[in-house]
Amino acid sequence: MASDDCLICRGEQEIVIGIRERGPYERMHDYTRVLFCAACDVGELRAFSYDDYVVYGEEDDVMVWSSLLSAADISRLRTGFACATPLDHGCACAQHVRAYNTSVGANKTKLPEYGPDRHSPAGRTTVTVQVIDGLVEFSSARPCS
Ligand SMILES: [Zn+2]
Ligand SMILES: [Zn+2]
């Protein structure tokens, strides 16, 4: 059910950073990770949530949020991420915690789950990466509107 394919070319993407993950469990799975599409030369901060406990009809059981990251920001992430196991979603080091906390606050776009615009990349927000006190963090490219 979870797909990390590129929203633009639908190709497979590399996982650059596994920020945090819970599951997959039978009825629940969520994660936040940074993906990169070599073909499009563009990165993405993606948060995925599957929750089978939501009341039917009240909320989608699958929700995906995405924000663009420039190739330059992806390079900054690769060199600046201050953890030896960047792909370890379960790591709780200061770098992983900082990345998760700032990813939550960064402006992401909720992708439509149904209809012709399903998982369309149109209108996505952009986030940037900066190194603060030796740790990489995410921030919205523009102030929240
Ligand atoms: Zn692509
Ligand atoms: Zn870590």
Image: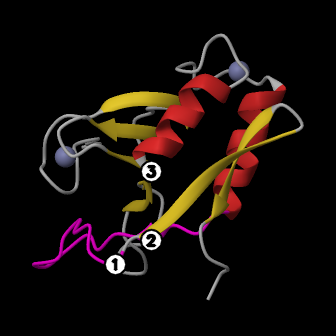
Please, what is the dominant secondary structure of the magenta stretch? Answer: loop
Vertical relation: 84 (above or below) 72: above
Left of 127 or right of it: where is 28?
left
Residue 99 found in image quarter? top right
Question: Residue placed farthest to the bottom in the image?
Answer: 145
Q: Which residue is mark 1?
A: 123
The stretch in magenta equals 106-123
Q: Is residue 28 visible?
A: no
Labelled pair 2, 1 in contact (Cβ < 8 Å): yes
Residue at x 79%, y 34% (from the top left corner): 135
Quadrant where ligand 2 appears: top right
> SS for tag 3?
strand
Q: Is residue 73 visible?
A: yes
Secondary structure under the numbered disc 2 in the rendered image: strand
Residue identifier under label 3: 46
Vertical relation: 7 (above or below) 40:
below
Quadrant of res 57 = bottom left
User: Dot 2 surroundings within 10 Å: few (below 14), some, or many (20 or more)?
Assistant: some
Q: Residues within 10 Å of mark 1 (few under 14, many from 20)?
A: few
**Amino acid type, mark 3:** Arg
Name the amino acid, label 2.
Answer: Thr
Q: Secondary structure at mark 1?
A: loop
Label 1 and label 3: CA atoms lie apart by 15 Å
